[in-house]
Image (tube, grey):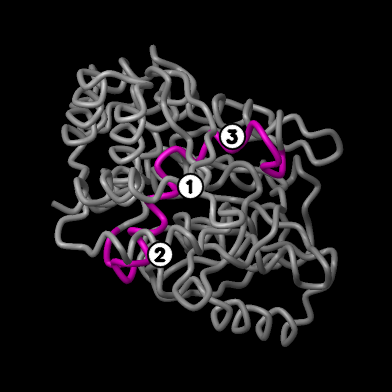
Amino acid sequence: MERITVELGERSYPIYIAADFSGLGNAFRKAGIGGKVLVVTDSNVGRLYLETCMAELASAGALVCSHVIEAGEKSKNLDTVKDIYRQLAAQRFDRNSTIAALGGGVTGDIAGFTAATYMRGISYVQIPTSLLAQADSSIGGKTGVDFEGVKNIIGAFYQPRFVYINISTLRTLPLRELRSGLAEVIKHGLIKDAGFYDYISLNMQKIFEFDESTLRHITRTNCSIKKSVVEQDEKESGPRAVLNLGHTIGHAVESVSGFSLLHGECVSIGTAGAFRLARKMGMVSSEVTDEVERTLEAAGLPVRAAGMDPQQIYAEMLHDKKAKGGKLNFVLPKRIGEVAVCTLDDERLLMEVLEELVG
């Protein structure tokens, strides 16, 4: 079992990378977590891994119970959080209790936000089972829910006690979910590490064959990139914004789709849009833009929001929590492996890009 530490002073925590759940109980013991543990999972993941994980936690001396939510983005709302609050209160969870998030990004965000707000904050741990969650959302303490169609508009920065990544869970992911997670993996290479981007491009087939050494390398590199950014800027006041490559357009597309598109699919579309915008601004070449789109497509990801209304996407972008005074913040590429944060209010230019994306 490998260990990487996110260094945040008193809020520091380890990320464990393993190929099964046999070390989960020991990770709880090392963290000094005892007492009651509520495992929050979804209806898909629960059938696969809930029993195994609950047994591991019980072996560590925890008093374990579970809460199963319906799988999918539509569960990511305050009503779901209220249901978890009710169970926590009914079973008399106190400040020494813990929530364990077993699942993908939706489960992690909901469970983390519930932990951040129940009794003004109780411990939680991340046990991500999707590639998207293992690569990105389980690390860094972003928690939250959607509200009235706007993604992640309610939330908190709240760090887990630890993250436990079992790469073998990727074998049970639906192919579409695996591809969705690759959007965040590719994003990390695009923002910080051109060599990693090349590695992904060259080893795409091995990823889909679940080659263990390839998955371990990708997981280790992802975690190292994400942790280095979080350590510089825990609450996204500056440098951490680079992690939002593809997200300004992507979140808007996700909302306009009614969440029928997966998060990673929308990030892929948004990344294609960011490169097209940067190309129009003279920041990157057409060749680089085309090459990145080919890589996204090789991962089975969309690069177009076909049939959507560009005006509706633009309106949703203005609702984004990163928008200020009608101006939009974009992470735009300077080259593969380096990006810059830009503020734009050129509606004409943005509409040109959006019309290309929906065409």
Where disc 2 sits, the SS reads: helix
In the image, which is nearer the foreground, mark 2 or mark 1? 1
Q: Which residue is mark 1?
A: 345
**Residue closest to the eye, 220 or 271:** 271
Q: Is residue 85 above or below residue 293?
A: below
Q: Around disc 3, counting alpha carbons within 10 Å, would you say few (fewer than 14), some (14 to 19), or many (20 or more)?
A: many
**Mark 2–mark 1 CB contact (< 8 Å):** no
Where disc 3 sits, the SS reads: strand
Q: Percent position (x, y) of residue 27?
A: 67, 42
Q: Which residue is mark 2?
A: 315
The amino acid type found where label 3 is placed reads: Tyr
Q: Is residue 264 left or right of residue 41?
A: left
Q: Is residue 55 above or below residue 288?
A: below
Residue for point 50% across, 64% down: 319
Residue for point 13% across, 51% down: 359
Q: Which residue is mark 3?
A: 16
Q: Of the two numbered discs 2 and 1 on the same chain, state the one appearing first in sequence.
A: 2
Residue for point 24% across, 53% down: 174
**Mark 2–mark 3 CB contact (< 8 Å):** no
Q: Percent position (x, y) of residue 48?
A: 37, 60
